[in-house]
Every structure is written in structure tokens, then in C-alpha cells.
Image (tube, grey):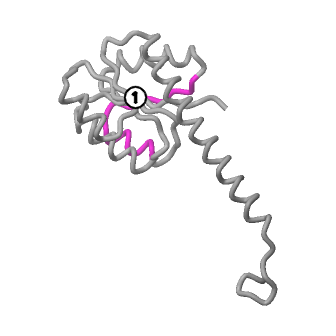
Amino acid sequence: MNESIFIVDDDAAVRKTLSSILCQEGYVVETVENGKQALKAVEKERFDVALIDIQLPDMKGVDLLTKIKQKQPRMVRIIITGFPSMDNAIKAENEGADGYILKPFDPETLLETIRKNLDEKNAEKIRMWIEMEKGNRFSEQFEKPKGSIFTS
């Protein structure tokens, strides 16, 4: 299954450009233009990555970042901005952004940032699965004592 990328940006040209680049790379893309639409979309569908503009017409991108994180904590969340500042970068990182990309963006940098973050998330999932499997094998090694509360 192809990974899905969710774009939240009020600029139609940015949404179209990002969609074109990402679709050519095989990603499934959905776009919205504001925070309210974004919150509705994440209620209905799961996404692997969100690209969130820092300046939306109805809320700040970092506020949306926090709300989306509550609904889909495993989603990669990357802030995109045409208003770079140290304050914005620090706030984005403090709110759990996995990346911070400047507009106008270089397509290769964008794709590299997405790939790197997806690889890290996938490696984390694999590590969790391995630890769960180790735990299952460990518990199967021990027989439940007869006549105890553990006997079914």
C-alpha cells in the first residue's frame, strides 16, 4: 500500500505543486486549505504524513499540529513555511513537528525529509513489533501453575 500524505495549505498553487511532486513519487495525496477542514479529514481517514503550513487563515499551523498529534499520534508532521524564523522553528519542534521545510522548497529536500521521517517511523514500528514478539515468546516459556489464579 502506498503511503498517504496530507497537505494543509491555504495557497492553491502550493497545494497543486506539492500534490504533483508527491503523486509522481507514488504517494497518495489529499489536500485541504484550512485547519477546520484538516481536523475533519483526520477524523475520517488515517494519513502517514501531514505537511502543514505555519500560517493558515483560521489557525496557526503549530496549533493544528498539536490537535492532529492528539488524533493521529503516529503520523509524521512536517511544518512548511514561507515565514522562517527561529521562534517559529522552536515552537514547531516543541509542539512535536518531525520536520521544518522552507518555501519555496526544493523538491529533493522535501522528498528526502519525508522519506527520512517515514523510514524512522517504520523502524520504530518494527522495533515495537519485535519487542512484543519477544514478550510473547518469553511468556510462553513458563507454564501457568496448576490450582493458581492463572489457571483457566
- Whether 35 is among the magenta residues is yes
Q: Quadrant of residue 39?
A: top left
At x 45%, y 44%, the residue is 42
Q: Quadrant of residue 79?
A: top left
Percent of width and height locating residue 102 = 31, 17
For label 1, count other residues whose C-alpha is less than 10 Å away and answer few (under 14), some (14-19) or many (20+): many
Depth check, front residue: 46 or 40 = 46
Depth check, front residue: 112 or 141 = 141
Q: How many marks?
A: 1
Q: Amino acid at mark 1?
A: Leu
Q: Please, is residue 106 above or below residue 64 in the view?
A: above
Q: Quadrant of residue 55?
A: top left
Left or right: 101, with 118 as reference point: left
Left or right: 147, with 130 as reference point: right
Depth check, front residue: 80 or 151 = 151
Quarter holding the N terminus is top right
Depth check, front residue: 109 or 142 = 142
Q: Secondary structure at mark 1?
A: strand
Percent of width and height locating residue 85 = 19, 23
Q: Please, is residue 56 above or below residue 134 in the view?
A: above
Percent of width and height locating residue 117 = 49, 29
At x 21%, y 29%, the residue is 88
Percent of width and height locating residue 152 = 78, 83
At x 57%, y 24%, the residue is 27
Q: Please, is residue 8 above or below residue 143 in the view?
A: above
Magenta region, residue range: 27-42
- Whether 38 is among the magenta residues is yes
At x 44%, y 11%, the residue is 107
User: Which residue in the structure is indicated by mark 1?
Assistant: 51
